[in-house]
C-alpha cells in the first residue's frame, strides 16, 4: 500500500513539474500584453510575428526614455538614454508638421507612439537624420547643444527620467551612440522603429500583438 502511495505521489509531482515547465515555455514564447512593455520582450514578439520583415530595428521606451537597437533576430545590440517630447502623450497634433516651431505650445510637444517605417533624410542644416514621421516633422537625430540653457547633454546624463522630456517631439540621441548604432541600422536605408506608448496598452498601437498565435 505504501509503495502504491509513493508511486502515485511521484507521478503527481512529475505531472506538476511537466505542467510548470510547459507554462514557462508558453510564457517565454508568447509574452503577455503587459510584459511587452519591456523592449526586449517586445523585440521577441516582433520577430515571432515577423513584423520587422527580417530587418534590424529599434524600440523606443518612452516611459524610461531609452532607445534599444536590435538585429534582425531580436538580439540586443545597444541601448542608450534619449531625449523625448516635452509633453506626455502618444499622438501628434494634426497638422503640427506644417507649423513653425514658435507656434507649437508646450502641451503639443509629444513624441508619437506606434510602428513607424523610417527613412534616412536631412534637416534644413544638411545634417543626416532618420525620419520617424515625416508629416508630423518627427525624426531621430543626434542631440543638439546649440541652446546651452536647455542643458541637453546634462539631461541625458541625469538619472531622472523627467529630465529627458525637453524636445518638440523628436528623439534626441547621444552623437556617439547615433553614429555607432542608429546610423548603420536606419541611416542608410528604410527601416522600422517601434515607439512604446505611455498612455495606452502596447497592443493598441501594435497590431501584431492582437493577432492570434
Image: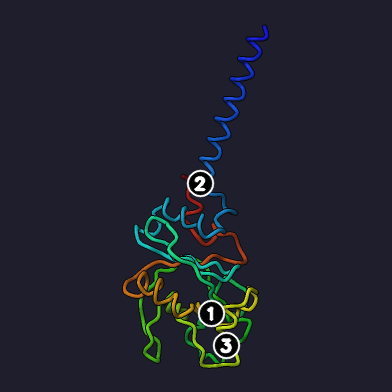
Mark 2 vs 3: CB contact within 8 A: no
Identify the residue at image location x=40%, y=66%. 192
Mark 3 neighbour density, 10 Å: few (under 14) some (14–19) many (20 or more):
some
Quarter of the image holding residue 81? bottom right
Compared with 199, 28 (above or below) is above
Q: Local crowd at mark 1 within 10 Å, few (<14), some, or many (≥20)?
A: many
Q: Position of residue 52 (x, y in %)?
A: 39, 59
Looking at the image, tell me whether mark 1 or mark 2 is earlier in sequence order. Answer: 2
The single residue placed furthest to the left in the displayed view is 188
Placement of 17 over or under 44, stated as above or below: above
SS of the residue under disc 1: loop
Q: Residue 104's mark?
A: 3
In the image, 70 versus 103, the foreground residue is 70
Q: Which residue matches tag 2?
A: 30
Q: Which is more foreground, mark 2 or mark 3?
A: 2
Quarter residue 125 falls in: bottom left
Q: Is residue 128 toward the left or the right of residue 147 in the image?
A: left
Residue 84, visible in the rendered structure: yes
Counting residues from the N terminus, which is met first, the one under dot 2 or under dot 3? 2
Q: Position of residue 119 (x, y in %)?
A: 36, 74
Mark 2 lies on a secondary structure that is loop
Spatial CA span between label 2 and label 3 = 41 Å
User: What residue does disc 1 label?
Assistant: 169
Amino acid at each position: 500500500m505504501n509503495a502504491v502511495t509513493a508511486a502515485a505521489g511521484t507521478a503527481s509531482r512529475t505531472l506538476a513539474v511537466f505542467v510548470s515547465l510547459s507554462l514557462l515555455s508558453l510564457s517565454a514564447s508568447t509574452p503577455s500584453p503587459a510584459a511587452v512593455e519591456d523592449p526586449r520582450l517586445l523585440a521577441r514578439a516582433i520577430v515571432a510575428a515577423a513584423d520587422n520583415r527580417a530587418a534590424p530595428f529599434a524600440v523606443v521606451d518612452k516611459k524610461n526614455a531609452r532607445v534599444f537597437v536590435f538585429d534582425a533576430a531580436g538580439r540586443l545590440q545597444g541601448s542608450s538614454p534619449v531625449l523625448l517630447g516635452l509633453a506626455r502623450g502618444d499622438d501628434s497634433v494634426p497638422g503640427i508638421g506644417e507649423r513653425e516651431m514658435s507656434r507649437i505650445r508646450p502641451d503639443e510637444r509629444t513624441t508619437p507612439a506606434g510602428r513607424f517605417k523610417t527613412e534616412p533624410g536631412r534637416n534644413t542644416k544638411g545634417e543626416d537624420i532618420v525620419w520617424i514621421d515625416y508629416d508630423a516633422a518627427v525624426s531621430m537625430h543626434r542631440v543638439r547643444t546649440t541652446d546651452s540653457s536647455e542643458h541637453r547633454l546634462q539631461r541625458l546624463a541625469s538619472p531622472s527620467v523627467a529630465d529627458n522630456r525637453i524636445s518638440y517631439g523628436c528623439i534626441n540621441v547621444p552623437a556617439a551612440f547615433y553614429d555607432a548604432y542608429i546610423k548603420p541600422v536606419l541611416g542608410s536605408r528604410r527601416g522600422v522603429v517601434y515607439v512604446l506608448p505611455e498612455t495606452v496598452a502596447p497592443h493598441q498601437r501594435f497590431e501584431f500583438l492582437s493577432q492570434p498565435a
